[in-house]
Image (cartoon, helix red, strand yellow):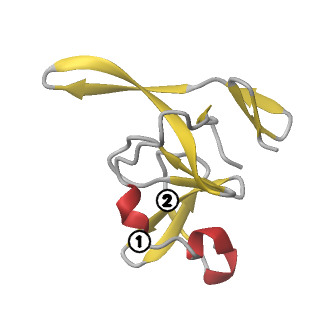
Amino acid sequence: MLFEKGAMLTGEQTYPARTLDCVAQGRRRAFKAYLVEVQPGVHVVEDYYRPVFFAHRCFWRFRDGGWVRSGSWLGPWHEASARDIPAELSALPEPDRYALFRGPRNATRHPIPESGA
């Protein structure tokens, strides 16, 4: 299991929630990014403008008809070969529909790790 209450585990390290400063209508606000499970083994960055998934200890995006991956949810992104793409991601219908995805109110939210791998 990758998660424990209030933290995300990657190997033996525990990471706090990531905060990304955003500028909205001329005001700065903190954006706390969390992962929410969309199907077993696949999480998505909740309420983010593009769908970024976390599966098999990597971050993934579906871009230009193919999957790219990164060690960070903010990139840089690298093309993934077909054999490297987790089956759970390949089976996702319409990955783009997870842009601005918001999980149910009672969903468990996990802080994003500093690095996926």
Q: Quadrant of residue 38?
A: bottom right
Q: Residue 32: x and y, percent?
A: 45, 26
Point out the image quarter for the N terminus: top right
Q: Residue furthest right?
A: 12
> Does 112 appear above or below 27?
below
Mark number for residue 94? 1
Q: Residue 19: x and y, percent?
A: 47, 24
- Badge 1 marks a residue whose secondary structure is loop
Q: Nearer the viewer, residue 35 or 13?
A: 35
Q: Residue furthest left?
A: 25
> Does 28 appear above or below 55?
above
- Badge 2 marks a residue whose secondary structure is loop
Q: Nearer the viewer, residue 25 or 108?
A: 108
Mark number for residue 43? none
Apparent side of residue 49 relative to residue 103 in the rendered image (left or right): left
Q: Residue 68: x and y, percent?
A: 51, 67
Q: Which residue is mark 2?
A: 77
Give the residue type that dot 1 points to.
Glu
Q: Quadrant of residue 86?
A: bottom right
Q: Nearer the viewer, residue 113 or 75?
A: 113
Q: Residue 91: x and y, percent?
A: 57, 75
> Does 15 appear above or below 52?
above
Q: CA distance from mark 2 to mark 1?
A: 20 Å
